[in-house]
Image (spheres, helix red, strand yellow):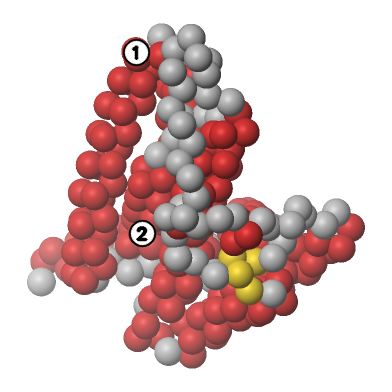
Amino acid sequence: MVVPNLLFDVILFGALLLAAILDNGVSSLHGAASLLAVGAATYVAAQELSDALTRRHWWTQESLSTALSLSTAGFIYFWWRNDSDLALLVLSIGLMMASLMIAIAVIGGCGTALKEQSSKPLGGLLLTMLGSLLLGVLAGLLTLNAPLIPRLLVIIAGMAWWKLRENVRPPEQNTRAQETPTANRPATPAPVPGKYGPPRPEAAARDATAHATARWALIPQRGTLLDRFLPILLLGAVLFFTFQQAGRSFLPAAPSASASSNTARK
């Protein structure tokens, strides 16, 4: 579903701002609002990451990208923000699914490499895993218990960064929704040896576009969600490491040795 750029920006940045305010005002949420908002954006961004690799003719799997990025972000959230039993249960299910997706992807990538007698599928597998891990780490840092004002400034600065880039170097028009639906579009004939030759790059790109269009999602007229979300992720990481260098951490303080011994005596 294509929506105007302004409406898409309001939904994305508004959800992140609202989640940060809710988490700060309601301590019993333990960052759940930010986890949901950041997790939803990360899920779509991981899909777009996989689509970008497909358009560049790299082997990739969307399920691997989404599972790996979400489970990485969820692990950071659980380990440093909310170690409740419910969070542990959700994380355990996510890690089991992610491990299954990794196993399937490794088998699929190795099988494709052997079939094509090329190492490029293994390179695509590696790029997918590294990109998804990086996306998950950055998203996880954004869910930690940061002070409200710096968190809001990061989101606002990320929005200003995107708007500046949108005006200085406008992204390409998003034509995914203008494509003929997959159900009504004639299928691309499979290449026959000696007749059609190898698949053409434009055919692979068109298939990737049709696959992206088949998913239900809000689609901006220009650019992607990843274009808008990446500045916030990068600024959030800068904020995290700045606080670390200044001696202030988003992470909960570890219990002292004396406190641990007192607890043991009791």
Where is 261 relative to 17, above or below? above
Tell me the quadrant of the picture where the N terminus can be found. bottom right
> Which residue is under mark 1?
114
Quadrant where the image shows the C terminus: bottom left
User: Taking the image as drawn, is residue 142 in sight?
Assistant: yes
Task: Specify the farthest residue to the bottom.
Answer: 25
* Type of amino acid at the residue the image marks with label 2: Gly
Q: Residues within 10 Å of mark 1 (few under 14, many from 20)?
A: few
- Quadrant of the rendered structure where residue 85 is? bottom left
**SS at circle 1:** helix
| SS for callout 2 | helix
Say few, some or many: other residues with alpha carbon within 10 Å of mark 2 (under 14 / 14 to 19 / 20 or more).
many
Nearer the observer: mark 2 or 1; the answer is 1
For the residues labelled 2 and 1, say whether their Cβ atoms are less than 8 Å apart: no
What is the CA distance from the residue labelled 2 to the residue labelled 1? 34 Å
Residue that label 2 marks:
74
Total numbered labels: 2
Q: Is residue 126 left or right of residue 152?
A: left
**Mark 2 vs 1, N-terminal side:** 2
- Outermost residue, left direction? 266
Percent of width and height locating residue 137: 48, 50
Q: Position of residue 56 (x, y in %)?
A: 60, 33
Left or right placement of residue 83 versus residue 179 in this view: left
Q: Quadrant of residue 60?
A: top left
Looking at the picture, how far across and down is residue 179, in whole percent?
59, 55
Residue located 41% across and 9% down the image: 117
Residue 217 location in percent, x, y?
A: 49, 66
Residue nearest the viewer, comparing 238 with 176: 176
The one nearer the camera, 73 or 108, is: 108
Three-letter amino acid code at disc 1? Leu
What residue is rendered at 43% in x and 89% in y? 26
